[in-house]
Amino acid sequence: MKSTAKKKIFINNMITLGMVVAAWIIMEVLMGTGHVSSLLKGLLVPFCIYVIMAVSLNLTVGILGELSLGHAGFMCVGAFSGALFSKCMKGAIDPTVSLVIAIFIGAAVAAVFGILIGIPVLRLRGDYLAIVTLAFGEIIKNLVNAVFLGRDADGFHISFKDSMSLGLKDGGEVLIKGPQGITGTPQAATFTIGIILVLITLIIVMNLVNSRTGRAIMSIRDNRIAAESIGINITKYKLLAFSISAALAGVAGVLYAHNLTTLTALPKNFGYNMSIMILVYVVLGGIGSIRGSVISTVILYLLPELLRGLNNYRMLIYAIVLILAMLFNSAPQFITLRKRIFGGLKPQHAAHSGKEEA
Amino acid sequence: MTGFINYLINGISLGSVYAIIALGYTMVYGIAKMLNFAHGDIIMVGSYVVFITTHSMGMPVFLSVLLSVIVCTVLGIVIERVAYKPLRDASPLSVLITAIGVSYLLQNVALLLFGADTKSFTSVVTIPALKFADGAITVTGETLVTIISCIVIMIGLTTFINKTKAGQAMLAVSEDRGAATLMGVNVNGTIALTFAIGSALAAVAGVLLCSAYPSLTPYTGSMPGIKAFVAAVFGGIGSIPGALIGGILLGIIEILSKAYISSQLSDAIVFSVLIIVLLVRPTGILGKKLNEKV
Amino acid sequence: MSDMLSVKGLSISFGGLKAVNNFAINIEKGQLYGLIGPNGAGKTTIFNLLTGVYKPDTGTILLDGQNLTGKSTTDINKAGIARTFQNIRLFKDLSVLDNVKAGLHNHHTYSTLEGILRLPRYYRVEKEMDEEAMELLKVFGLDGECDFKASNLPYGKQRKLEIARALATEPKLLLLDEPAAGMNPNETAELMETIRFVRDHFGMTILLIEHDMKLVSGICERLTVLNFGQVLCTGPTQEVLSNPEVIKAYLGE
């Protein structure tokens, strides 16, 4: 009997991509006819950012099977390297081109960090790995806040104390002002660019999962010892998954940086709170379910923003919903229902999903 | 030199608070096999109870602290029963996310009840500071009480675990829950007791923390919670002496870093030390090595 | 040298306990060899030593003349030893087909980039892998369930899948750790046929650990008996099984 799984997977992936494209078309039409509130308009690019974060985190948590609590750190690294480039190039090249190049730079730098951090981290056991990734995320945020970078006719100057000690000559400018971050980045991000990046991220992750490399990564997740016994290089594939995940987070970071005029590393945007929030999106969407990450980000990010009217009670409701959702998440009836909505083949067939509850 | 000793004392004091918080984390992790992310926020709850009762109700300090411990203990037991027990057999990740939800819940309830403004916490310690070496070395009353409390708690807890039936039950459940059930150990009760003790300790830690560092907001518990968790892992998660060592060391490193290197980078340094230790000893200083059966 | 596997003086201690002491074995190419002994004798430990899960304290392991002593599990598999496990270790959330395709990893390659960009090589190699994996599944009668999640297979089929996956790595030597564990007599008889077929069809050299004496006496050509980490007896199957020392070791005194 022939395998029909490939076709099913392809169709499923197309549906996910189609959903994103449809969302884009709908929003563009609505915006064109003036039906979209400025509140919602302001949420569109951030939404893209968080979808990319969630999908890339799912690569680490759901596909590789390792709990990372420092994903925001990679976003931070990407954001700052991308913003630095754009600020340096401001006026010299078209902002959109600058954004595109910045994306590559941010992804590359984040990938490098992914490898550097992955090498020590990925050999630790589950819970320890989680706390170390959290630690790295905090370290990155802290370090970025301590950096003062300036440029003048002599080149670049760096300091960890303050702007003065950069010793810049006349005509020089301070690029990164320590805790005040980078100001004056061009706001080149648009919803369309965001959606394109979302689609690219989805395609990369989907294609990776359904390939030889994806199988190797998932076999490590499912049974490391067995994976070794069939000749799979554990370190290589763990690092590969981790760094691709980091690179994509870096892309999200660049998009984030180009959506603001001032980029600063605060606990709320690059700290563990952000990493945890993304993790919540991933878990509620279904670990290992790429489509689930997209849908859960829509619900969990947009909903509280749209509920702003309830202001004070907003986060409280969010917290209660989260707890209830997790409780129901583990009840058998809801697991089957969720699987049917959020994608994957029939329960009997493989769905590339990660370790589900009980 | 005296500067160094002062910093060292402060570090030990802060570390003692971390150690007390870390105890709660490590006990819950060892016995209930979960990371109670909301633990840090129980600290905050404990502090607010003391704040409200002393400020608005004029309750005497002793009663205030006692009430705080009771409230937190009950809160801990309720949270366990409502949010964690149903997920006891689910994946550890689910419980972690639920704990995150509980953490958000506690923070936001506090936000609604008490507002986001920073409250000025009045220290519960009335003992005057001790001065040594002609006033060059100061040991504040808070520091003294904190360190002594930590020692008392450690001794008390270790005795409890080793000498009482309930404590032995805890050890049994942490080793092998299934076997413990078969041996007639009341697992539900034991886990509830673990949360109760952990939460009571959190209340104490909260009071001590806010006495020494008097600003209180709904988010006060969050970072110390994380750091205490780091301390627990650092010392070897699941190990009580590990929590003590991890906490004290962390406090010392943090204060010394703030003093001698940079206040900005102190957190980064603390976390870096953790990473270095784990690379050398992957299960923490006193952690047990786990061997996977092939 | 017609020996596929040649082991001399293999020992390992855990803590103060010598788990394996001076173990030696010689298996010829294409032989069906059995490693038996009472529980706790150290049989799986020997497998772990042969596959690099543990590094031996002393001794040498030669596979088809190549020295594998001290190499990593991954390198040993690439050199030609594949195994199954006492407690089945399938990739639970992958499909039956993907489990086998995972085993084909090192023999059918394309880069990660080619996979992400879906270049022609991806399609070509994936097709090869699909065909080869299905062939292998057919051998074990698992092709009908190729898209099933591995954890949804009945126990007996899971064991077969594990063997299929091991074979996918194109080994020279196949180690089977209690392949008949938990099987009823019918399944065991079917497994015996399968193992014999694997040896005949693939020219495979097979070393198996087993407690089921029917299977052992049914297909093994030679046996080594292990007791307390040491070789008690070695020789042709019937000789060994009728050796009074061996019988004493199993039944105890």
Image (spheres, rainbow, N blue to C red):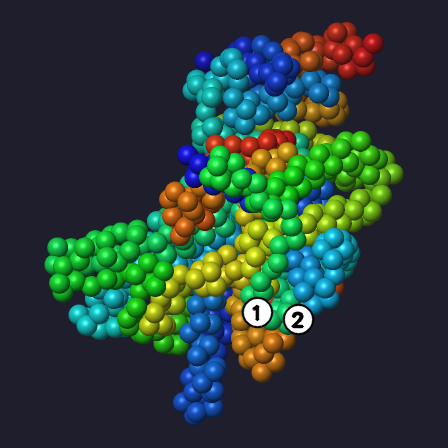
Q: Residue at x 61, y 19 (%)?
A: C14
Q: Secondary structure at mark 1?
A: loop
Q: Residue at x 73, y 18 (%)?
A: C38
Q: Is residue B161 visible?
A: no
Q: Are marks 1 and 2 on the same chain?
A: yes
For the residues labelled 1 and 2, say whether their Cβ atoms are less than 8 Å apart.
Answer: no
Q: Is residue A15 visible?
A: yes
Badge 2 density bin: few <14, some 14–19, many ≥20, Cα 10 Å = few
* Residue farthest toward the bottom in the current orientation of the protein: A33
Q: Position of residue A226 (x, y in %)?
A: 56, 37
Chain letter for the residue marked with disc 1 in the picture: B
Whether A152 is drawn above or below A196: the answer is above
Q: Secondary structure at mark 2?
A: helix
Which is nearer the eye, B140 or C157? B140
Chain letter for the residue marked with disc 2 in the picture: B
Whether B70 is drawn above or below B128: the answer is below
As drawn, the label of residue B113 is 2
Q: Is residue A288 left or right of residue C112?
A: right
Residue beneath disc 1: B116
Q: Residue at x 79, y 34 (%)?
A: B168
Which is nearer the eye, B127 or C253? B127
Which is nearer the eye, C31 or A123? A123
Q: Residue at x 50, y 61 (%)?
A: A274
Q: Position of residue C58 (x, y in %)?
A: 51, 13
Q: Is residue C164 left or right of residue B199?
A: left
Say which amino acid is labelled 1: Ala
Badge 1 density bin: few <14, some 14–19, many ≥20, Cα 10 Å = some
Q: Position of residue A331 (x, y in %)?
A: 74, 61
Say which amino acid is labelled 2: Leu
Whether A332 is drawn above or below B189: the answer is below
